[in-house]
Image (spheres, helix red, strand yellow):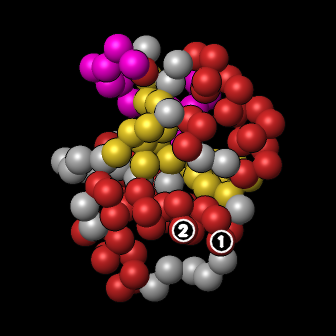
Amino acid sequence: MSELTQKEHDAAQALNAEYRRAFFMNRVREAGCFWIITDEDGPVVLEEQSEDAGGQVLPVFSDEVFARDFIASQQLEGASPQKISCAVYAEKWYPALKEGGGLLAFMPVPDGEFETDLPEKLG
């Protein structure tokens, strides 16, 4: 996968939630992987006031730089991006997310809306 230019990065950050999700899906199909955020306790999850999600939403990012941006904006000390291949996601992450009732948050940005969906929508 090609690295993002600063112009591409800035343009992607400015997209609305629906287009950021489409951007994410295209980049993941091209690269065969995506990024999550982890800390000493494991994957970082967002709290969602949704009965569908069991209260937990896993933020996912198409590129490491977007995960780093989110870490910085949320001041998540001790957190770092972790790369997940689509193959590993399908084998390990998807079953756990599906069983646990969690949702995926596609490329959340600070103070912006983001789309969530069931885990089977990825991978």
Mark 2: secondary structure:
helix
Res. 105 in view? yes
* Residue type highlighted by circle 2: Asn
State the image quarter where residue 16 is shown: bottom left
Q: Is residue 84 left or right of residue 59?
A: right
Q: Residues within 10 Å of mark 2 (few under 14, many from 20)?
A: few
Q: Is residue 90 magenta?
A: no
Query: For this rendering, which residue is in front, 107 or 70?
Result: 107
Residue topped by disc 2:
26
Residue at horizontal 57%, vertical 80%?
Answer: 3
Residue 95 drawn at (x, y percent): 71, 26
Q: Which mark is residue 30?
A: 1
Residue 91 drawn at (x, y percent): 80, 36
Range of residues picked out in magenta: 37-52
Residue 8 drawn at (x, y percent): 40, 81
Residue at horizontal 61%, vertical 62%?
Answer: 28
